[in-house]
């Protein structure tokens, strides 16, 4: 029997398949279904500071409207209201943690320095096995340089690292100029792993209504190529763990990620498309592949096709692009 176990963020996993932050974590039944199907771990949907602030604003605004509509009521008629902050989310994380045995990872996206620290501390107390720093940032200010954005990232990480003893993974954007340098700097600051990549929601434009709209579109297998490339480049160059996210739709995809050098993979789209029990099919496919190729454990082939170990290291750089153009006569 082949051994699919791995280690991610210092946490022992029975296999590399981790359910990414998604609607699957919204219900205990679906979390348990993922565990029963063979998931090695699950990331709970992010705690968003902006969402909490927005909900607090709506709550206050509604109370003010209702008070104004009843002008004859005294001020004491409407008690002062205050949003509960992250309490509801924290309670849900605790409940989820208690409901299953598999490792559970929290995810955090904040805006202000104080919230990053405060929420990180509170998530630590929920009993989760690790914390994913979801650095979701869209740069729109022309006066703010790439170096400024990287500095902000490092400051967030340093503050969170000082606030918790939990292992930390940073979920990175694919848009940094030098991903290898950024990951190296994160490692220096005590980060235990990186998730490649954060899949940004892309807005669209409806020409008929002349309006901007957004919708959640599931990933496709083709989207795996970008994170696959950078996992392969990073493997052996940094000491922290690498988790590939986006485009993992099959057991073969997970094997490809491991060959590139990943410690684990995250996926959701294939489970929403094929059903949560499909996890067990992915695991069977991985076991069959390892048996066919005479591998007993993941470390026997992990990183075998990373840039540092493959026969053609230039395949992950521009030279391969030139070669393809010449081959196809473009």
Image: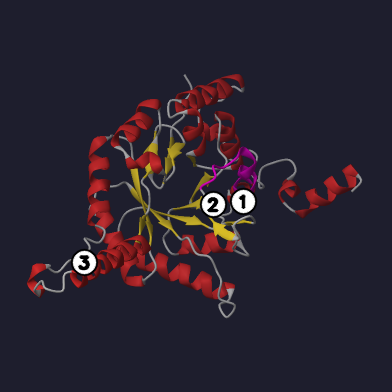
The percent position of residue 307, horizontal first and vertical second, equals 67, 47
Residue corresponding to mark 2: 197
Q: Which residues are magenta?
A: 216-228
Residue in view at x 44 percent, y 32 percent: 15
**Pair 3/2: label in front:** 3
Tell whether position 290 is magenta.
no
Q: Are marks 3 and 2 in contact (CB under 8 Å)?
A: no
As measured in the structure, the alpha-carbon distance from the residue carrying label 1 to the one carrying label 2 is: 9 Å
Return the mark for residue 66.
Answer: 3
Q: Which of the 4 image quarters holds residue 74?
A: bottom left
Q: Earlier in the sequence, mark 3 or mark 2?
A: 3
Q: Is residue 127 visible?
A: no
Q: Are marks 1 and 2 in contact (CB under 8 Å)?
A: yes
- Tell me what residue is drawn at x 49 percent, y 23 percent: 281
Q: Find disc 1 in the rendering and name its residue.
A: 230
Q: CA distance from mark 3 to mark 1?
A: 54 Å
Marks 3/2: CA–CA distance: 44 Å
Residue 120 against residue 324 in the figure, above or below: below
Query: So how many labels did they put on this image?
Result: 3
């Amino acid at each position: 029997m082949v051994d699919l176990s791995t280690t991610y963020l210092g946490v022992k996993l029975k296999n590399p398949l981790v359910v990414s932050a998604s609607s699957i974590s919204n219900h205990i039944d679906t979390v348990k279904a993922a565990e029963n199907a063979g998931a090695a771990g699950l990331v709970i949907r992010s705690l968003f500071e902006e969402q909490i602030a927005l909900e607090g604003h709506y709550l206050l605004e509604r109370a003010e409207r209702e008070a104004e509509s009843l002008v004859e009521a005294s001020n004491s008629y409407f008690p002062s209201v205050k949003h509960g902050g992250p309490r509801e989310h924290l309670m849900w994380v605790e409940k989820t943690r208690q409901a299953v045995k598999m490792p559970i990872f929290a995810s955090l996206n904040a805006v202000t320095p104080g919230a990053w620290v405060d929420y990180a501390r509170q998530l630590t107390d929920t009993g989760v096995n690790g914390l994913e720093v979801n650095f979701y940032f869209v740069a729109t200010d022309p006066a703010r340089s790439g170096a400024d954005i990287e500095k902000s990232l490092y400051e967030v990480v340093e503050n969170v690292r000082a606030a918790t003893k939990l292992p930390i993974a940073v979920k990175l954007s694919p848009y940094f100029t030098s991903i290898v340098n950024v990951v190296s700097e994160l490692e220096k600051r005590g980060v235990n792993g990186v998730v490649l990549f954060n899949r940004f929601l892309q807005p669209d434009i409806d020409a008929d209504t002349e309006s901007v709209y957004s919708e959640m579109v599931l990933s496709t297998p083709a989207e795996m190529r970008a994170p696959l490339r950078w996992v392969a480049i990073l493997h052996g160059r940094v000491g922290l763990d690498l988790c590939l996210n986006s485009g993992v739709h099959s057991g073969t995809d997970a094997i490809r990620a491991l060959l590139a050098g990943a410690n684990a993979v995250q996926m959701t789209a294939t489970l929403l498309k094929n059903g949560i029990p499909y996890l067990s099919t992915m695991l069977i496919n991985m076991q069959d592949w390892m048996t066919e190729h005479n591998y007993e454990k993941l470390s026997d082939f992990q990183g075998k096709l990373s840039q540092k170990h493959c026969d053609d290291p230039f395949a992950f750089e521009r030279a391969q692009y030139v070669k393809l153009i010449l081959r196809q006569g473009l």
